[in-house]
Amino acid sequence: MPNFSHTCSSINYDPDSTILSAECRARDGEWLPTELTLSDHIGNIDGELQFGDQNFQETCQDCHLEFGDGEQSVWLVCTCQTRDGKWNPTQILLDSQIDNNDSQLEIG
């Protein structure tokens, strides 16, 4: 199961570009910078963030990362618009789909 946060540090999110960046450990132990554009992989489906779609930033606002304790702990949290125009608080677990593949962030 993907779980990039276990082998990456300095995890950041830029809401303007939707880029998730981190320093991730390669197989040889070296730590290297990497990034992934989240809007290429996450969309807003009726007010809910979901993998497998795109361009969530067009109908979501106030997006930021939240870090939990323990395993699977990096969340993207936003307020996203529903089909009827209401604003819905939503979050998506990034660790559930993003993996560190030899220091490269990838959708797993």
Image (cartoon, rainbow, N blue to C red):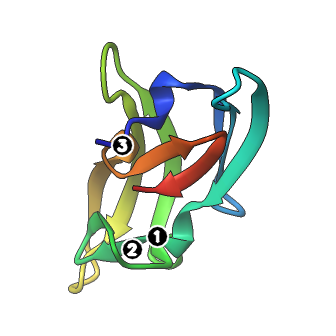
- Ranked by sequence position, the earlier of labels 2 and 3 is 3
- For the residues carrying marks 2 and 1, which lies nearer the camera in this image? 1
Residue position for label 2? 43
What whole-number distance in Å separates the C-alpha atoms at marks 3 and 1?
15 Å
Q: From the top left corner, tell me how far across and down residue 16 is, in percent.
A: 71, 61
Above or below: residue 84 compared with residue 36: below
Q: Amino acid at mark 1?
A: His
Q: Secondary structure at mark 2?
A: strand
What whole-number distance in Å separates the C-alpha atoms at marks 2 and 3?
19 Å
Foreground: 14 or 87? Answer: 14
Q: Amino acid at mark 2?
A: Gly
Q: Quadrant of residue 72?
A: top left
Foreground: 32 or 59? Answer: 32
Q: Residues within 10 Å of mark 3 (few under 14, many from 20)?
A: some
Q: From the top left corner, tell me how far across and down residue 60 is, in percent.
A: 45, 67
Foreground: 61 or 13? Answer: 13
Extreme residue in the bottom direction: 83
Q: Residue at x 50, y 38 (%)?
A: 65
Q: Residues within 10 Å of mark 1 (few under 14, many from 20)?
A: some
Q: Secondary structure at mark 1?
A: loop
Residue position for label 3? 2
Q: Residue at x 29, y 66 (%)?
A: 50
Q: Are marks 3 and 1 in contact (CB under 8 Å)?
A: no
Residue position for label 1? 41
Going by the image, does 60 lie left or right of 80? right
